[in-house]
Image (cartoon, rainbow, N blue to C red):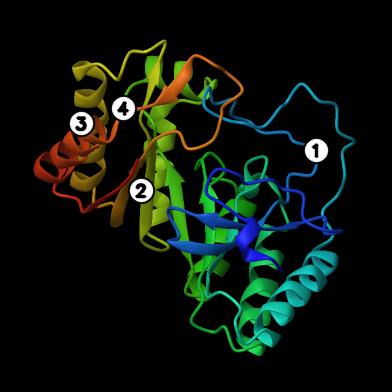
Amino acid sequence: MQSSQLSTVDHSRAYGRFTYIYPVISRRSHGLSIGVNLSLDNRCNYNCVYCEVDRNTSVQRAEVDPDAFGRELFQILSDIKSDPHGPEVKDVTFAGNGEPMAVRCLDRCIELAARILSALGFADTPVVVITNGTYVHRSWGRRALTRLAAAGGQAWVKLDAGDQHRMTRTNGTEFPIERLEENILDASRILPVTIQSMFMKCWGKPPSPKDVDQYICCLKRLAASGAVIRNVQAYTVARQPRSSHITPLDGTALELIASRIQGEAGLPVETFA
């Protein structure tokens, strides 16, 4: 694997002849992350304005083959392990072109990932699931989180807004924000969660003070309800979205928002400008 060819601005899901695996240099993982794309048809129940995935492209629906995924993961980790100058693997992350928790065999894939990591000497490398949280109340979603907790993994849950209007505008969904808050709380009862939040400019305008107020109020409601939140990842656009009017928020503005989150919601924050 040529890690020098990877970068934080190129998270292509295509790598060699692999179907499920794509290595990336991840800002939020602080290094090499082995990405897993189980959304082979590019479908997602969100349609975020900052997403770079082209959902207008027709892709044939395909069932996930956990065993084929396992073989690919075993191969890439074996290749890395055999290279004395190979990079450190920071995590194996289920993300990809859609919502990974929509895939009903995610629990099986998590189990395989944990087993392969252990077998190849990567036992301290965590399995991460990046999720929008909308399937936590489903039986297969809870199975996946339970398996993730048993593997010592991490759940990073997307929360980009504190009110329904902004959530719908940002994430392209009518999923009720009240249900999302309940799901985040329920997920945190299975394992501590990281909240992952995008802040950006839309038509050159940053989030309004009201938008930030409502977002922080949402975090405070979660904390008051007993949600176990490890930290908040406040980040901005790193790769070109489909929508050209979405652009990065500058670092100073992002740090100001992070300072408010930490001061008002009492949560540790990492920023990624």
Q: Is residue 79 shown left or right of residue 157?
A: right
Kindly identify the residue that appears in the image at 63 percent across and 64 percent down: 3
Instruction: Identify the mark at residue 185; answer none if there is no mark.
Output: 2
**Sequence-wise first label, 4 or 1:** 1
Look at mark 1 in the image and give the residue it sits on. 41
Q: Nearer the viewer, mark 4 or mark 2?
A: 4
Q: Residue furthest front?
A: 4
Could you say whether the residue bearing mark 4 is in a helix, strand or loop? loop
Q: Is residue 17 visible?
A: yes
* Measured Cα–Cα span from mark 4 to mark 1: 30 Å
Look at mark 4 in the image and give the residue it sits on. 162
Vertically, is 67 above or below 37?
below
User: Relative to the observer, which residue lies in front, 80 or 159?
Assistant: 80
Kindly identify the residue that appears in the image at 46 percent across and 16 percent down: 169
Looking at the rendering, in which quadrant would you find the C terminus?
top left
**Sequence-wise first label, 4 or 2:** 4
Instruction: Identify the mark at residue 217; answer none if there is no mark.
Output: 3
Q: Is residue 50 shown left or right of residue 260?
A: right
